[in-house]
Image (cartoon, rainbow, N blue to C red):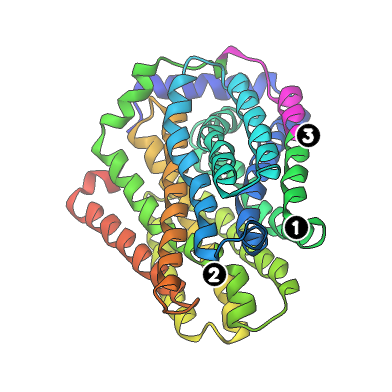
Amino acid sequence: MLDKAYHAQCAAVNVHCTNAVEQGQYRLTLLSLALGSFCIGTSEFASMGILQLFSDSLGISIPTATNAVTAYAFGVVIGAPLVTLAAAHLNRRTLLLLLMAQFVVGNILSAFAANLEMFVVARFISGMPQGAYFGAGAVVATYIYGRGHSGKAFALVMMGLTVATIVGSPLATFLGQNIGWRNTYLAVSGLGVVSLLALFTFVPKTDALNGSSVIRELSALRKTSVWITMLVAALGVASIFAIYTFVGPLVTDVAMLEAGWIPPALAVFGIGMTAGNFLGGRLADAYPARGVLLGFGVAVIVLAILATFGSNLPVLFAGFFMVGATMFTAIPTIQVRLTRFAPEAPTLVGAMNLAALNLSNAIGAWSGGLAIASGFGVLSTAWAGFCLTLAGLIIFAATLTRRPRLAAA
């Protein structure tokens, strides 16, 4: 449970926001945070939409090309704790600006990579700021919303990412198909510069957003409940990436459609993510476990249907929507549970949540690629996701059964 000091800090922050932040500034601050996550989401998910393009350009197979997707994910996994701890003393506004600047540099390097090795390094650099950005962004959003609304605040930051899957990623895929995949990353870099300027202009300068000591942030990593929750996230959410990474082949090789159908398929996925994120943000603040149980439980059913009947076009597109919706219903609850388990380190646990989700990215992309490389066909990626989400659901249910105190947190 939240300690008294944390309650007092949150109450003070809430009063400050109510009295000092004008309504227009309030909206522009939140919009700036969402724009940054929109840029990050566009870069991350566009790589999956243009997977076939850069694999052909670099002369590598699709399973090999997923190494670039995995490299981005590992950049998040490794960067989330390292960057957050290295910058623990920084004001969250300053940290957000530095992170967005690194994001811009990483995407420029991606655009000019001459071979797979350089491309993998560039994607790793691009991924390093993501976890810390969402952690710091959640702190700023909670500063705006006030205590008791951390689920809604995190969902707001995540909304930029989910909207990226509706608009940013399909548009980036369309650009890649028409003007080249390298120009896609240059366009993302330009949008990142706009985001950087928005954060600089609209995120308030206040001591309330000052960082804390490294020791205080590290205290979260001594808690078993934090690591178990991260494991649940890493396994359970992996199914979304086992499917999303291979949307292109699923559309062209399974449904036998033209490549022009890939952007609409990505948009359907994104609409599902956005709907799930909206629902999940509200469930997370009201219930301690329902978002994960509902999201993972429905997802395993959807994945089994998709794996069996996914060659049917309506089933395939409905599956895209539902996989996105169910996974993003669970994510805000995971964030709220982490924050409640370690209220003294909100930035680090927010970053570690994104690290766990991007470990999901790596696990999902790897497991889907392994299933295809083993000769089971593109639809076998849904069975790979089924196994991963089922494992996450079982572990989560076991923690509720064996440790009821966690369920009542």
Q: Indicate whether 82 appears above or below 404.
A: above
Question: Depth check: 310 or 2 in front?
Answer: 310
Is 350 placed left or right of 108 in the picture? left
Question: Depth check: 164 or 402 in front?
Answer: 164
Determine which of the numbered discs, if any, sits on residue 176 in the image: 1
Determine which of the numbered discs, if any, sits on residue 322 in the image: 2
Question: Depth check: 209 or 240 in front?
Answer: 240
Q: Residue furthest right?
A: 179
Rendered-image quadrant of the C terminus: top left
Q: Indicate whether 376 appears above or below 368.
A: below
Residue 393 position, x and y percent, is 32, 61
Within-10-Å neighbours for mark 3: few <14, some 14–19, many 20+: some
Q: Secondary structure at mark 3?
A: helix
Q: Nearer the viewer, mark 1 or mark 2?
A: 1
Question: Depth check: 58 or 37 in front?
Answer: 58
Identify the residue at image location x=82%, y=56%: 179
Identify the residue at image location x=65%, y=61%: 49
Q: Amino acid at mark 3?
A: Val
Identify the residue at image location x=56%, y=25%: 14
Within-10-Å neighbours for mark 2: few <14, some 14–19, many 20+: many
Q: Secondary structure at mark 2?
A: helix
Q: Indicate whether 82 appears above or below 313.
A: above
Q: Is residue 387 magenta?
A: no
- Residue beneath label 3, please? 194
For the residues labelled 3 and 2, the Cα–Cα distance comes to 32 Å
For the residues labelled 3 and 1, the Cα–Cα distance comes to 21 Å
Q: Residue furthest top?
A: 207
Residue 304 position, x and y percent, is 42, 78
Magenta highlight range: 193-207
Q: Is residue 270 visible?
A: no
Determine which of the numbered discs, if any, sits on residue 85 in the image: none
Q: Amino acid at mark 1?
A: Gly
